[in-house]
Amino acid sequence: MSGIDSVSRLRDQVEELASKGYTTVNIDQLALSLNNIINRGDQAREFDLTNHSHALEYERSTNIEMFKSVIVTGQSALKSAMLLNGGAAVAMLAFVGKLVEHNSMSASEVAEAVLLFAIGALLATLATGSTYLSQMCYGLDGAEGTWKARIAASLHVITVTFVAASLGLFGYGAWRLSEAVAGIKFVGQMYVCAPFVG
């Protein structure tokens, strides 16, 4: 029982005594004082509820903004993985074309790096699709704690794995490319390559 309930009960008892004729104390004054205490308690409770409501709203808006930030960061990672791998693949295709023109044996080694970049771009694209599916499963009504939530979490892990693999393939492709290009020498009008050890 709260303090306000206790005071309310006491006020009722005082009023009951007043109705029975007990007047040794100023009953009206006592009841008025008790009513003031109750009203102040109601105002304090209202103040506490308002503060609690503001705190909940602040927490909710903070969580929403953090979630938006996570989404934007994830989108940036996906775009970066696609741009890195796709840009590298396109740039190397032009380079391979030039190497083939000059009958360089390094063209096949550079082409392997292009393949790694292309697979990395494909993985980044697949990650975009699995991100969509993951968010769709998270957004289903009542998804929390159900098979839908487990599917969403699994798709989330798959997305992160695709992006990590895409970035890993870019790094490995860049290393393979640097090894292949290191063996190319330009002599007159021809490219000559040293054997690639890889």
Image (cartoon, grey):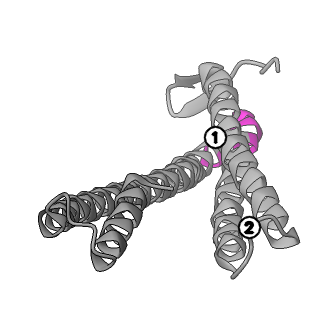
User: Is 189 left, or right, of 114 in this rendering?
Assistant: left
Q: Position of residue 122 (x, y in %)?
A: 70, 60
* Separation of marks 2 and 1 at Cα, in angstroms: 31 Å
Please say whether residue 102 is one of the residues in the magenta stretch: yes
**Pointers 2 and 1 in contact (CB under 8 A)?**
no
Q: Quadrant of residue 37?
A: bottom left
Q: What residue sits right under mark 2 in the picture? A: 144
Q: Quadrant of residue 195?
A: top right
Region of the chain picked out in magenta, as a range? 100-112
Please name the amino acid that badge 1 sits on. Leu
Q: Residue at x 36, y 59 (%)?
A: 4
User: Is 185 left, or right, of 28 in this rendering?
Assistant: right
**Element under label 1?**
helix
Q: Nearer the viewer, residue 160 or 109?
A: 160
Please name the amino acid that badge 2 sits on. Glu
> Visible in this render: residue 134?
yes
Q: Position of residue 86 (x, y in %)?
A: 56, 55
**Element under label 2?**
loop
Q: Residues within 10 Å of mark 1 (few under 14, many from 20)?
A: many
Please say whether residue 101 is one of the residues in the magenta stretch: yes
Q: Position of residue 144 (x, y in %)?
A: 74, 67
User: Is 105 left, or right, of 100 in this rendering?
Assistant: right
Q: Is residue 196 above or below residue 154?
A: above
Q: Nearer the viewer, residue 4 or 165?
A: 4
Q: What residue sits right under mark 1 in the picture? A: 167
Q: Residue at x 59, y 31 (%)?
A: 191
Q: Is residue 98 above or below residue 68?
A: above
